[in-house]
Amino acid sequence: MTQAVTNNLDYLAARAHARRSRLADAQCLDTFCRLRSIPELAAARHPEFKTETATAWQHQLTQALVRELIYWQKNLKGPAARLLHWLLVRFQLENLKALLRAWRARVSTATVRPQLILLPPELRLDADIPADVTSLSHLARRLPEGVFRECLERLPARAPAAASPFLTEAALDRTYFEELLRLTSQLAGEDHDCIHAAAQQEADTFHLMLVARGKFVHGLPVELLNRLHVAGAGISRIRLNAMLTDTDLRTALRRAVGPALDAVPTTPEGEPAAASFATALEAATRRRLMRLAHRACRGGFTGLGAIVGYAVLRRIEAADLTTISEGIRLAVPGEGLRARLTTSQKVEATHV
């Protein structure tokens, strides 16, 4: 990579637009939903992947996304490079969650090493956690210095958060989103508006999951969930507290229409309310995020918005392809599988 390319936003944004044009569209995904084996899916979308299983396919999808983010980050400078680095940190957080789950289950964390996402050296974690590590604070001391280590160290040893996997992971997620909003708030001009809006949507999706899953699925105390509010998101702390104190999820979600939702999602009849709402809610927030990512890409042919917008769309594509691979593995009919995808003909017709 030559110096002329480094921090050349015109060139990098042009590459992002070109790559965006090659993402799987709704018609392609519809075709993929009719495939019946992972090798067929790999041949259709990523023939360079040599894989026979859904797990291996999903791992390679994630690694391909990470490689792209590394490319953008290495060729940017200043606030833009710091933001792209933080998008990579999201995968460090996913690795940390995998290690935490293995540790809680008393499974040797070495067994999850093959499942971890390969990251640049500065973001790698020690996967070998000794059996004598018996507390979160002890485990935290094995992490590299940084916000996630500080987050775990701040959790009181006897607090419910230390005993609840949901609350522990939510505390880590909150740490991630607070820094994401801080970094996007430092951007200037039109890049700030479009990128910060997408970042706020991600933070507000986290808030909605605190309500839907934290309160209405897991039944966790309101006072603990409200402490996890992400400052600077579209949903204020006061609004989040009101949502957490509502007696039913549909009422709570109505309060988020505007700041974080286009409308309260509908759910199939006969399903448990909280579980079905949470699933439908995730789909609704991803579609809204997808619209914001397209807007960032369209904000101008050049600029950081095109790069970050593409990175978000690339992650959504990977999520849809992961959903398809799981559907193939579980022999889900194509029509039922299409309904679970974020990318649809309706979304593309409206927002592309």
Image: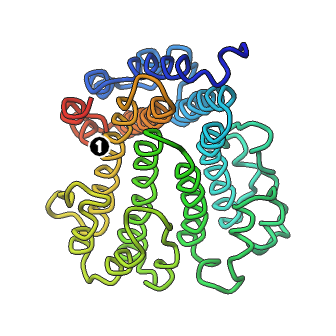
**Could you tell me which quadrant the C terminus lies in?**
top left
- Up/down of 38 relative to 179, above or below: above
Q: Residue furthest left?
A: 269
Q: Nearer the viewer, residue 287 or 14?
A: 14
The spot of residue 90 in percent (x, y) is 60, 48
- Residue type, label 1: Arg
The spot of residue 97 in percent (x, y) is 63, 57
The spot of residue 18 in percent (x, y) is 44, 16
Q: Nearer the viewer, residue 83 or 152?
A: 83
The spot of residue 236 in percent (x, y) is 39, 71
**Could you tell me which quadrant the N terminus lies in?**
top right
Residue drawn 33% across the image and 84% down it: 245
Residue drawn 74% across the image and 54% down it: 109
- Up/down of 205 relative to 40, above or below: below
Residue drawn 63% across the image and 61% down it: 101
Q: Nearer the viewer, residue 312 or 119?
A: 312
**Badge 1 is on which residue?**
340
Answer with left or right where residue 118 lies relative to residue 311: right
- Specify how the rendered protein is coloured: rainbow
Q: Quadrant of residue 85?
A: top right
